Amino acid sequence: MTLRLRLLAASAAALALLAPLAHAQSAVSAGPQPLPPEPPIAEPKDAPYPGVLTLVVDATDLDHAIQRVHETVPVSGPGPETLLYPRWLPGNHSPSGPIDKLAGLVITAGGRPLPWRRDPVDVYAFHVDVPAGVNEISVDFQFLSPVSTREGRVVMTPQMLNVEWNAVALYPAGYFSRDVKVDASVILPAGFHAATALEPVSSEGPRIRYKTVNFENLVDSPLIAGKYFRQFDLDPGGPARVSLDVIADRPDELDAKPEQIEAHKALVQQAYRLYGAHHYDHYDFLLSLSDRMGGEGLEHHQSSEDGTTPKYFLDWAGTSAGRDLLAHEYTHSWNGKFRRPADLWTPSFNVPMRDSLLWVYEGQTQYWGYVLAARSGLMTKQQTLDAIALTAATYDHRVGRAWRALEDTTNDPIIAQRRPLSWLSWQRSEDYYSEAQLMWLDADTLIRERTQGKKSLDDFARAFFGVENGSYVVDTYQFDDIVKTLNGVVAYDWAGFLRQRLDGHGPGAPLDGIARGGYRLVYTDKETEYQKSAEQRRKSTDLMYSLGFSINKDGVLSEVLWDGPAFKAGLTEGTQLMAVNGDAYSSEDLKDAVTRAKGGAEPIALLVKDKDEFRTVLIDYHDGLRYPRLERSGAGPAFLDAILAPKP
Ligand SMILES: [Zn+2]
């Protein structure tokens, strides 16, 4: 049921409980009475919507970063109609449809304005009364792209744009979104080239019209377009076309070297060798390289939106942090889009999602993202080991597990919607991505150990995701299906294994996979190249495992570790460091001070500015700089080495 109906049902139940008490006190209540209900919003039903919607998005206004929408919606007679703006977005796993960016809504019928009313409980729903004799209504509005990151993700710049159809379309309530057909077009700025998984049927001047699809596929097939564009065929002669479609801020940023393209081609082959099937007719990586358009990683069945640094090709060695992006989003075509948790699948974009199995949907995707990046050569083996070390250290320091189990973090897309948090290590945040990555490494090495290396999590992936080759009809699953498939690989108490890690409270992160993989997590005073790249990407200095904070390029603390040395000295996120032991702050001087204090007795003195107040805090820390890395334990072949090696 929709959120609105659920709320109404809940309040009706509450009134029914209260009624006898009120009656006992007084025959006539003196308090306020509820207003009559708003017109109901029809529940989605699985039946074809009569007629085809047309949708035209004019994306030419780059000056103002506005996408103008004109839509026609066939209607089947007079009476109340409700139009919905998509609210629950797949991939976001949350009610994050950008309704605040919709403006200028005008609905007309036969050229006459039709008054609309927004539902006061479900603000994503618009009610209209269709007059007699009308068989189609017109809808016009604008989607106002953020013009600065303060307002959200910027999706239009002078050089490029991104059309996410959920942001530029209303659709009729009362139907499954797969039952509503749409004929969509886009009008592009002069000289722009577009890429999308939608199939163009015609192009007249700057207007491209796409093959009619259902509303679910439309929302699942966003478009990027840019002034500077290159396309690479990643699987010539393969079973399905796979394209790398790249747009960039500047033409030189498109200069991919042949070996870089080879690694992307290897990603496709390694994914096929892992899963043994694919779930698309064709696939487009929609890669935008920009520091003006907002970054993104959003999966779809036949494409992914991959927005990252403009140095992606130009500084290949220095941008290893985050290079799992394409491997991660590509994996989602199998894990997340094709196989989907039963409670996450919904019949329309306005029915609430439930996120309880995101530790598979995102957690195992995080795992395969790194593994496939290593197997394909997008990342070196060393970079991948260093990335795993950083993940292991980060989650080993998430003391929030004391109160909050891993599975509870699957609610975070709804709770926090990626807003910044004051105490990340205590609150925890979407830990089902990377902590579950460690959990799946644990499972993989356990399978390898119990089968003397004959079986692995690859066998699970093939059995679970590699079925029904070519199909992209969603196949849902529940907890027991995962356990059953794992047991098909090797018999074990998998339910107990998973529940212990999902419900447990530590201490520490699940690191058995690293140990069983032939490595151990150690801390040294030297950063790995990967960690340097991660710091560069975040424009911050990471001292989480020594002083217990990270600090941004302006000297402001961006995170303080709960119960760490800085926490104990009274510091919080947002505090500015002014001086270290009497000298003006610089990140290098701070690191020197940590090194000099090692093994000594003198505390490190920090002059800090907190709002308008200056104060000196003393951090009693003497263990020197500490950075995580993996070190080989024992001799002979290690499972982790086998996991990261290309699959022949
Ligand atoms: Zn993901």
Image (cartoon, grey):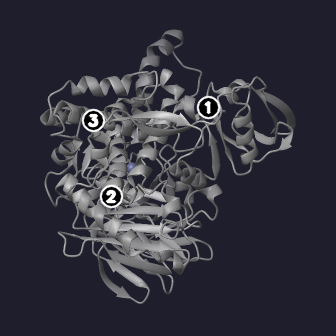
Q: Which SS class for mark 3?
A: helix
Q: Nearer the viewer, mark 2 or mark 1?
A: 1
Residue on which disc 1 sits: 561
User: Can you give x and y, in whole percent of width and height, for residue 408 in the image?
Assistant: 42, 30
Q: Earlier in the sequence, mark 3 or mark 2?
A: 2
Q: CA distance from mark 3 to mark 1?
A: 30 Å
Q: Nearer the viewer, mark 3 or mark 2?
A: 3
Q: Quadrant of residue 341?
A: top left
Can residue 83 be seen by looking at this rendering?
no
Q: Earlier in the sequence, mark 3 or mark 1?
A: 3
Q: Is the CB of mark 3 within 8 Å of ligand 1? A: no
Taking the spot 21% from the left edge, 45% from the top edge, the residue there is: 458
Q: Residue furthest bottom?
A: 205
Three-letter amino acid code at the position of disc 1: Leu
Position above or below: 442 against 530: above
Residue on which disc 2 sits: 330
Three-letter amino acid code at the position of disc 2: Tyr
Q: Nearer the viewer, residue 496 or 548?
A: 548
Residue on which disc 3 sits: 445
Position above or below: 203 against 427: below
Q: Nearer the viewer, residue 94 or 289?
A: 289
Position above or below: 369 against 31: below
Circle 3: is it few (<14), some (14-19), or many (20+) Cα within 10 Å? Answer: many
Q: In this rendering, would 394 be left or right of 300?
A: right
Q: Nearer the viewer, residue 89 or 126?
A: 89
Q: Quadrant of residue 232?
A: bottom left
Q: In this rendering, would 611 be left or right of 26?
A: right
